[in-house]
Amino acid sequence: MSSDGPMRQTEQFLHLYHPPAINGDFTGKHIISVEQFSHTDLDIIFSAAKSLRERVAQKDPEVVTLCSGRLMASMFFEASTRTDMSFQAAMRRLGGSVVSASNGVQFSSVYKGENLADTVRAAGCYADVLVLRHPQIGSSYEAAYYLDRLNERIVTPTSVISGGDGAGEHPTQALLDLFTIKDLKDGPDNLTITLVGDLLYGRTVHSLAKLIARYESQNTTLCLVSPPSLRIPDTIIDTLDKHNVTYYETDDLYEVLHKTDVIYWTRIQQERFARQADYDAVRDNFIMTPAVLNQAPRDVILMHPLPRKHEMGTPADHDILDQNPRAVYFQQMENGMFVRMALLAKVLGVESI
Ligand code: ASP
């Protein structure tokens, strides 16, 4: 198919565009899948994130010069709090600037019916890096495909970083999740990591499971706990098999909770269900409460990508959980900013981190 062929369905770009392996060099690359990262690439990002975290804590004045003069475009076609804000905060803490359509993409030319490829190319003409979240699987692949062709013809080439592709992937969330597991539990080696909830539509668990596999960790067990109708997709299971990761699928949390080192709790992705009745059938299957957490080992950590709804119990339960040192989702959230700082700086070719 030629690049100027008819408009294609977004999902087709999963086959049309092949994200480049990082191979130790992030400069100018699109970041759209965890499949791009090797163990070494992950260690590069994690050590840069750790060092930036220390430098920010020490108020090192040089941090704010690292990306000065560089521009990030933020395009979110789906709701976001943490991903959007942490990318913006990351870019500003590095001294860069952020542009976005006033009042969000719903008031951009998308409102007039502009297609994704043209909207992305508009950002591509103005920015050095584009953070894109879109409800369709393959949207960041489509963006990368068109940006590659645009970049040959403009003076400010742009890399796209995925902020979440529908029910597909959320690569930067997986980076911050694995960073947190490494940071707080010295993992993922020798750990039992239990992913709970909506493993079918939850893009964060898709990316995290694949990233753990790609990290080639030793003696890691993944417990995959979900209602039978929300099992993790077979493509992810294939990746686990390919990398010889030990995994165990169940719909009974209590089979595995007592031997778990890391609990990764998730929201049922209501917005991805075609029928309300299917959502209602599973919405209350897994509810984390202080009593449930107490049945896990004392040194367990409780992670959640957030936002949380009733799967974390009542607001009173939230308050109690938040005070429990085992609940680390706020550290996880802050780590997201440092990991995204590291990634932005690397993609923008900053040498000194
Ligand atoms: N914030 C995460 C995401 O964008 C998790 C969620 O929405 O449940 O995928």
Image: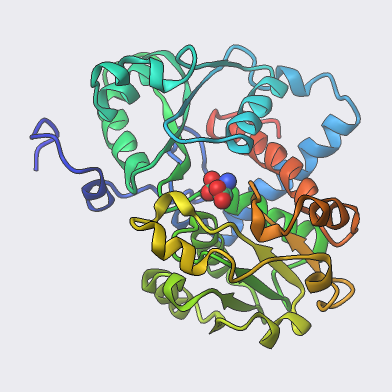
At x 81%, y 77%, the residue is 296
Q: Residue 209 location in percent, x, y?
A: 54, 66
Residue 249 visible in this rendered orientation of the protein: yes
Q: Residue 298 location in percent, x, y?
A: 89, 74
* For residue 123, above or below residue 183: above
Say which of 147 and 194 sits in front.
194
- Which quadrant of the structure image shows residue 114? top left
* For residue 214, above or below residue 108: below
Position of 59 with respect to 212 (left or right) is: right
- Which quadrant of the structure image shows residue 275? bottom left
* For residue 291, above or below residue 72: below
**Which image quadrant: the N terminus?**
top left
Say which of 41 and 323 sits in front.
323
Colour scheme? rainbow
At x 61%, y 69%, the residue is 195
At x 72%, y 23%, the residue is 93
Q: Residue 313 location in percent, x, y?
A: 72, 59
**Which image quadrant: the C terminus?**
top right
Position of 45 with respect to 159 (left or right) is: right
- Which quadrant of the structure image shows residue 234? bottom left
Q: Residue 318 location in percent, x, y?
A: 79, 53
Farthest bottom residue in view: 255
